[in-house]
Image (cartoon, rainbow, N blue to C red):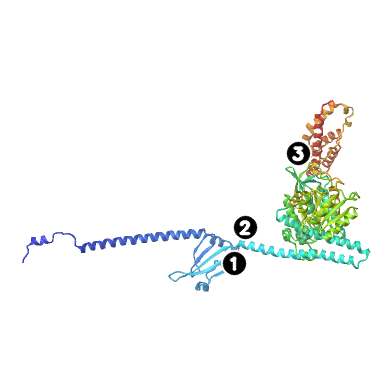
Amino acid sequence: METTTNEWAGQFQPTKPSELQLLKAKVAQLEQQLQQERKNRLQLRARTEKSQADLLRQLLAATPNPVCVQDGQGRIILANDAYHHLLRLRAGRADFVVGPDPALLAGDATRSYEEQYERPDGPPLSYHIIKKPFVRPDGTRYLLTSATDITALNQARVAAEESARAKEAFLANMSHEIRTPLNGIIGLARLLRGAASPAEYPDHLDSILTSAEGLLVVINDVLDFAKIESGALDLETMPFAVEAVVQRAAKSLAYNAQAKGLQLHVCLPAAPLPVVAGDASRLGQILLNLLTNAIKFTPAGEVTATVDVSHYEGGRVHLQFCVADTGIGIAPDKFAQIFRSFGQAASSTTRLYGGTGLGLAISQRLVELQGGRIWLDSQPGRGSRFFVSLPYKVSEELPAPAEPAAEAPGLLRGLRVLLVEDNAVNTLLATSLLQAWQASADVAADGEQALERALATPYDVILMDIQMPRLDGLSATAHLRGTPGPNQHQPIIALTANALKKDVETYTAAGFTDWLVKPYHENSLYLALAYASGRAVRPAAPSATRPAAPTYGFAGLGKLAHDTTFIRKMQRLFIDTVPAQLGQLEAAVTGHHWEAASQLSHSLKSTYGNLQIDEATHYARKIEGILKKNPTSETLLNLLVALRLVTSQMVEAFETSLRQPESL
Ligand code: ADP
């Protein structure tokens, strides 16, 4: 059957797309989407890679450890700032930058070593370096190098090693320092018991004493050092005369100097030094250390101790002490070392001169604790000069009177003493002393025995050891104080090896009256017993002592001396003008205006003279004399301090007098 055109046309009318067409379209669309997604993924990956690379770069830049990566030809393909910085320093060995070791690059092994880098502005830096090869997925090999700064670690290690070595040497020294005098003591004591003739007794006993005192110095040094290290050292503040401390230190070593044929001099300033407030015994200890060394290290010649005012500042006088010798001297490169604990200039020092190497370390800490400075100047073979500068508050109070020597004999005659002590040697010593002083002594070997005796017999004083078996001294004393009996309120003196502030507080709290530190000097025991029993009166505490008012008088005013109105006017005038004139004089001296200072001191001298204030007239005359000859502000300011002290006492005395009604 034939079909017409229309029929064909009718047959090819656009109809709904067939399934195939739909499928094709879908595929095309999916392909497009896929392409887009692939593009997005590529873009994302590129972005991620870029940000990761950024992060990595940032991380590398921020890392304080130098890092670098080299390719097979040794070219640096990656390095951070720390690495570039390190490269600018001069390396002791240049391994860090040298091209990769072919063997290292080819294998898997890691290499590590230490390297030093010089710095222009400080000690060299030490780095621990690690080199490690790595392989990329495409097979290319690289070398990663990274370094770690171990300078501080090395320093700590060296310090620890040094300290261990020093402590070992110290222990060896200590054992030598303790054994030598102990050998002497034991040997001589044996001789005394057996072979020695009575004629040799005094010499042997002197040697025993010297050895034992030497031992005490060693032990005190070690204890002091431990106290300083743990921050448990308390400094006193009491008025004292500096000259007396210097002289005492030198005097106590006069014998040692003489025994070596050395001249020992003390050089004090022309004008008296002001009385200062501070720790006299610690100053004495520093000077004693320096003088002992000076004598020890000087085979021939002389040793001189000097003190003078360095300057005045903020109400303080800065004193400068110097201990000079003509001895073996010290090489400049050892100056720092000798101040270190256990440090000596040379190991031969120990063999030749002994010593623990603690003296200067202690002296330095003591000086620094008091706000001062210690330094030295020395030349090997020519001698040394050790300087100490210390600031002290000028004290308005007089120094404490020296403790009277136990020379008043018979004070303890008939005193009944209970000695509580577990150590046989200490017991023998104390009972022998008590016997020599004609006191009677009962002995208890521990706290329990002490309680038994003390409950049965009345005593004038109890001497109580602290550390004892069974019942210690603290508990025994607390018990005695709390139990009614003949000794409940009697004085008890602690015999102790510990004299830290906290120990003393414990003794007081437990009920002790006083304490003595072992080994005590016989004079100290004598006085402690005399004070505790009330047979002698302890001198007043220095803080309560005011300087005696200087004398004055009006006889020099002739007839006017009897005119009370005139005298009162004079006193008022003194109060109103003299302190101000003194201020002007001080200013003139400080500014080196010698002419003005001369006039002022002359005028002041006649004012003091008219009122017969002899002490002040003496100082003013001295100042005038110095101003005429060779004025230096140090000497003058020194005298001015003394003058001001007298003047302020006069002002106080005149003010008191003016407060009285005129008719009196
Ligand atoms: P010690 O004297 O016990 O060894 P020091 O700390 O007092 O300890 O001194 C440390 C070192 O300093 C001494 O061993 C010595 O080498 C050196 N020294 C100190 N004072 C002098 C001095 N006046 N002359 C020479 N060397 C000195």
Residue labelled with disc 2: 121
Question: Mark 3 is on which residue type?
Answer: Ala
Quadrant where the N terminus sits is: bottom left
What is the C-alpha distance between the residues marked 1 and 2? 21 Å
Of helix, strand and loop, which one carries label 3?
Answer: helix
User: Can see residue 289?
Assistant: no
Which is in the foreground here, disc 3 or disc 1?
Answer: 1
Which label belongs to residue 114?
1
Residue pushed farthest left?
1
Q: Position of residue 552 (x, y in %)?
A: 86, 34
Q: Position of residue 335 (x, y in %)?
A: 73, 59
| 530 w.r.t. 566: above or below | below
Circles 3 and 2: CB atoms closer than 8 Å: no
Disc 2 crowd rating (10 Å Cα; few below 14, some 14-19, many 20+) is few
The image quadrant of residue 556 is top right
- Horizontal side of 372 relative to 72 (left or right) equals right
Comparing 140 with 152, the one in front is 152
Residue labelled with disc 3: 587
Q: Choose the circle earlier in sequence order: 3 or 2.
A: 2
Ligand 1 is within 8 Å of the C-beta of the residue at disc 1:
no
Of helix, strand and loop, which one carries label 1?
Answer: strand
What is the C-alpha distance between the residues marked 3 and 2? 45 Å
Comparing 5 with 499, the one in front is 499
Q: Position of residue 106 (x, y in %)?
A: 50, 73
Disc 3 crowd rating (10 Å Cα; few below 14, some 14-19, many 20+) is some
Q: Position of residue 287 (x, y in %)?
A: 79, 53
| 82 w.r.t. 480: above or below | below
